[in-house]
Amino acid sequence: MLSRKGLIPDDYVLTRLAEDVQPPKFKAKPRKARFVAKNGTCNVAHTNIREQGRFLQDVFTTLVDLKWLHTLIIFTMSFLCSWLLFGMIWWLVAFAHGDLDQNGDDFIPCVTDIHSFSSAFLFSIEVQVTIGFGGRMITEECVSAIIILIVQNIVGLVINAIMLGCIFMKTAQANRRAETLIFSKHAVISVRNNKLCFMVRIGDLRKSMIISATVRMQVVRRTTTEEGEMVPLDQIDIHMDNPVGTNGIFLVSPLIICHVIDKDSPLYQLSSIDLQHEDLEVIVVLEGVVETTGITTQARTSYVSEEILWGQRFVPTVSEEDGMYAVDYSKFGNTMKVPTPCCSAKKLDEVGGIALFKMNEGVTLRPSVRRRRRSTVARRSRLES
C-alpha cells in the first residue's frame, strides 16, 4: 500500500487503512466505544438476531457481503455439488437402462461410453461446462436422458450467472474507490470570517473525479430527553458550509469543509475546556459517484474530542508552479496555531460577536497568546520608564 511504502505522510488517514494511524504518545483517558472507526468501519455488533432466514431471501447480496474465502469456497462447492449430483443421475439412468451391462453390437445405450460412476461424472462435467463430448454422447434412445440434459444446462447457466456476477460485484465494489479518498487526521476549531467554525480537510488521490460529491456531518453522543429517557447514540445532523456554496463539491484538489458553530449547532455551548471533557464523536461522510464506473461510493471517518484541535487551522497545500496548480500532500494534515477565543460560541453571541469580544483583554485569546502579549506590554512599560 502507498502508506506502507512511505509515500503517504502520517498527517492524514486513508479511509480504509486503520493500521497506518500512529498510536498516541500519551495514554488517552478512558472513554466509551467509538461508533465509527478512523478507517470508516462501523463499530456495531448485531447480536440475538432471531430471524436469520431473512438473509436467505436476498441470496445475492448475502454472497457479495461474505468474505473472499467464504465466497471462493461457495463458488467451488456449487460447481462440484452440481457435477456430482448430475453425475449420480446419469449413472442411475445408465444403470436403469442397462448401459453398464450392455451386450451385443445391436444394443443402443442412452449415453455412449458410460461404464462406471467415474465416466458418468466426467460426462456430467462435459455437459455443464460444454467442454466437448468426445466419445461420450447422448442418443435418442431415452427421453429421460434428453430431459436431464436440458435441466443440467439450465442449472449450469444459473450457477454461472450467480457466481460470476457475485465475483464481479465483489471486485468492483465501490468501497475500493474509497481507498484513495482521504481525511485529515485531526479536525480543527478556529475563527473564520469572524465566526467560530469546525473544519476538516478532505482530498482525493486519484485523477479520476468523484462526480456530485457531497459531505455531511453528524454528532454522536449520549443525551437525555426531557422525559428522562437516555439515548446512548443520539445522531444529530449539523449544517455544512461547502466551499463552493452549493450542495455538491468539486473535489479536484483538497478542500476544507467548514461548519459554522451557530445557535443551531450541537457544538454551540462547548468551550475549549468543555471539549476536553465532553464525550462526543463527529462523523464525516463523503459520498459521490465514481466517474469511471458510475457506481456510488462512500467514505467515512470520525473525530472524537481528543482529535479536535482548538485554536488551529490548516496550512495551505495548493500552490501555482509553471502555469499550473500543484498540491503538496505532505502538508495535508498540517495545522498552525491562530488566535482563537477559548469560550463557547454561545458566549461570543452573548457579548456581541468576535469583534466586541476581542476588546476584552485577557479573555479573547488563548492563554499562550495572552502571556506573550502581557510580556510585550511589560517590556514596553520598562523601556518607557
Image (cartoon, grey):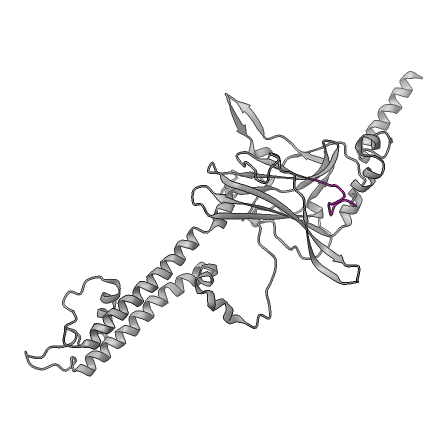
Predominant SS of the magenta segment: loop
Quadrant that contains the C terminus: top right
| Left or right: residue 33 compared with residue 61 | right
Q: Examine the image and state in which quarter residue 256 appears.
A: top right
- Percent x, y of residue 203: 56, 38
With respect to residue 320, does 105 lie above or below?
below
Q: Residue at x 53, y 42 (%)?
A: 181
Question: Hey, which residue is sitting farthest left in the picture?
Answer: 105
**Residue drawn at (72%, 60%), measured in percent from left and top?**
231
In the rendering, at what x and y percent does residue 91 appear? 23, 77
Horizontal side of 150 relative to 297 (left or right) equals: left
Q: Nearer the viewer, residue 245 or 208?
A: 245
Task: From the viewer's side, name the closer residue of 107 and 352.
Answer: 352
**Residue extending farthest right:** 385
Q: Would you say residue 318 sits in the magenta stretch?
A: no
67 is higher (above) or lower (below) than 274: below
267 drawn magenta: yes
Q: Is residue 70 left or right of residue 280?
A: left
Residue 286 vertical placement versus 384 (above, below): below
Q: Nearer the viewer, residue 77 or 146?
A: 146
Residue 165 falls in image quadrant:
bottom left
Furthest residue toward front: 246
Residue 183, position in %: x, y? 59, 42
Which stretch did the figure color magenta? 259-269
Number of numbered discs visible in the structure rendering: 0
Q: Residue 302, image x and y in percent?
A: 63, 48
